[in-house]
Image (spheres, grey):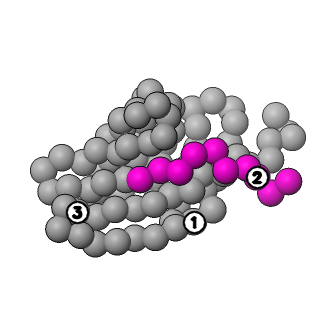
Amino acid sequence: MHGQILHHFSAINSKKKKIFDSDFGGKTCKYDGAKGVLFCTATGFYFSGKSLFKKSKIAIRYSQVSQIEKRTVGLINSITVILADTSDR
């Protein structure tokens, strides 16, 4: 299996506040637009550039940025996360 879709993320980058909303029961994470780094302690996901890993030993990859739209509110990034094959523990 190439991987299964875990969740669909929607990062909202606003001028003042940078909040990252996920489908994990309305969990919120902090997103640093300047560095392009996303860190969520609640879910334990860490997004940096084009790499997405979980704090646990399970490696997670994201297929690619689904779409990037510019709006008055800010920059919205749709990211699809897939669970990589972790047969090697």
Quadrant location of the C terminus? top right
Q: Give the range drawn in magenta.
A: 1-10
Report which residue position mark 1 lands on: 64
Answer with mark 1 or mark 2, whichever residue precedes in sequence. 2
Label 1 and label 2: CA atoms lie apart by 13 Å
Is residue 7 part of the magenta span, yes or no? yes
Is residue 73 part of the magenta span, yes or no? no
Q: How crowded is mark 1: few (under 14 residues within 10 Å), some or many (20 or more)?
A: few
Residue 8 image offset from top left, x and y in percent: 53, 51
Q: Is residue 5 above or below residue 68?
A: above
Answer with mark 1 or mark 3, whichever residue precedes in sequence. 1
Q: In this view, does 55 lie above or below 49?
A: above
Report which residue position mark 2 lands on: 3
Report which residue position mark 3 lands on: 74
In front: 51, or 26? 26
Magenta stretch secondary structure, dominant: strand
Q: Is mark 2 on a helix, strand or loop?
A: loop
Label 1 and label 3: CA atoms lie apart by 20 Å
Answer with mark 2 or mark 3, whichever residue precedes in sequence. 2
Residue 82 image offset from top left, x and y in percent: 66, 51
